[in-house]
Each structure stands twice: as C-alpha cells, then as structure tokens.
Image: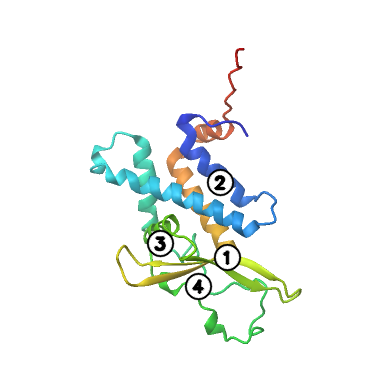
C-alpha cells in the first residue's frame, strides 16, 4: 500500500483500519490488536463527526467534508447500539463456555444492560470519552477459560466510566472480540461512505493513491 494524499487522509486512514479489522494481520495478540484498531476507528470518526458541530451553525459551514462527517453523527441517532447494524451484545458470548458449565444461570450472563436503550450516538460519545481518558483504573481485561485445554484466554475488555462528566453513576461495558470487529467495521463503513458521498471514483483514487519519494540529491 502506498502513501496517502492530503485530500484523502481522513477516508484512507479509516478505510485501512477497517481493512485490518475485516482481515486481521496475523499476530499472537489478536484480541489486543482488535482493541487497538477498534479504538483508533472510534477516536477518529467520533471526533470528526462531532467537531464540525462546534464551528457555528450548519448553514455556516463552508467545507463539504464537515457536512458529510456530521451526517455520520446524525445517522447514529436513528438506532440503538443494541440494534442492527451495531448489535452490541447483551449476553455473554459462548466463546469457550457451555451453558451452565461454569455453574452460573443463564440470567447471570446478561451484560451491557446500561446500554440497552442507548442510541449509537450517545454510546460512541460515552465510549470515546472512556477510552480517551481511560487507563488501567477504568479498563480491565476479560478472561475466559478454555473448556478444552483449561488455558486462560483474553476474550475482551471491561470498561467502567462515568455516565457523563462529573456524574457519580458509573456505566459498565463488556466489549468482546466479535463486537469490536463488527461495530468497528460498521462505524468505519458509515464514516467512509458518508465522507466520499458515494463517489466511487474518489474511493478508488483514495484507495490506490501512490506517493513517490523524492530522490535525495547528494
């Protein structure tokens, strides 16, 4: 893959991150890699979709990219984060466990109840803040034990963060590997499609652009 032209940078970076989510590079640390890619997509797209709204009223915006990026935020208002296409898990996925094999009832496996009624817009705002301001005090690994080998495996990450700035209420998110891949890919798709305006020529140009290095003169 070649360089990135200035006019393509927003689309190209997010598109390449999506490509790595969809077809992950081989690594021993696949869940951690997915978390890094997902976080990068989220931080970039959320910031760009919100920032245009801080520059006066929409009718005053001169840059078409501001309008297209803000369309992403508006599209997030239409669906809950637990609905298609996002489908944030509300039950612990059956990664290596079998129903009741760990001695717990099915009801105990419900997760992410804090987000059942939350729109995608509010969810991504909360999660962006949680990741951007989070550290080892608020983000912890989720481990599962393989029923076949007994090996302890990293399955995802648990995020605990204030419901909003200054709030006492803490929301808890269990973010598993498949959720990160799916939600990150959908978010990147939404952003790239909006930014390009459906212009296939732009997407082909941005996706295949090459920048040659200038030969150094001794």
Disc 1 target residue: 156
Disc 3 target residue: 123
Cα distance in 3D space between marks 4 and 3:
14 Å
Q: Residues within 10 Å of mark 3 (few under 14, many from 20)?
A: some
First-in-chain label (2 vs 4): 2
Numbered tag placed on residue 90 in the rendering = 4
Q: Secondary structure at mark 3?
A: helix
Q: Measuring 41% from the left and 57% from the top, which residue is drawn there? A: 133
Total labels: the figure holds: 4
Cα distance in 3D space between marks 3 and 2:
20 Å
- Looking at the rendered image, the quarter that the C terminus falls into is top right
Q: Measuring 29% from the left and 46% from the top, which residue is drawn there? A: 53
Q: Depth-wise, is mark 4 or mark 1 nearer the camera? A: 1
First-in-chain label (2 vs 1): 2
In the rendered image, residue 203, in percent from the top left (x then y), is placed at 52, 36
Q: Secondary structure at mark 4?
A: loop
Instruction: Specify whether 67 is left or right of 185.
Output: left
């Amino acid at each position: 893959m070649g360089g990135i032209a200035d006019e393509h940078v927003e689309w190209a970076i997010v598109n390449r991150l999506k490509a790595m989510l969809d077809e992950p590079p081989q690594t021993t640390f696949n869940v951690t890699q997915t978390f890094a890619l997902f976080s990068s997509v989220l931080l970039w797209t959320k910031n760009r979709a919100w920032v245009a709204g801080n520059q006066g009223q929409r009718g005053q915006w001169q840059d078409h990219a501001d309008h297209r990026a803000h369309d992403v935020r508006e599209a997030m208002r239409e669906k809950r984060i637990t609905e298609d296409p996002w489908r944030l898990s509300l039950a612990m996925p059956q990664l290596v466990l079998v129903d009741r094999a760990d001695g717990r009832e099915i009801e105990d496996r419900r997760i992410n109840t804090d987000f059942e009624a939350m729109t995608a817009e509010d969810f991504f705002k909360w999660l962006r803040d949680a990741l951007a301001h989070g550290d080892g005090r608020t983000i912890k690994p989720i481990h599962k034990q393989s029923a076949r080998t007994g090996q302890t495996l990293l399955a995802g990450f648990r995020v605990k963060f204030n419901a909003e700035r200054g709030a006492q209420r803490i929301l808890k998110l269990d973010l598993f590997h498949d959720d990160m891949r799916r939600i990150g890919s959908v978010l990147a798709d939404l952003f790239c499609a909006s930014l390009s305006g459906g212009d296939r020529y732009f997407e082909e140009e941005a996706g295949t652009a090459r920048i040659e290095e200038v030969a150094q003169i001794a």
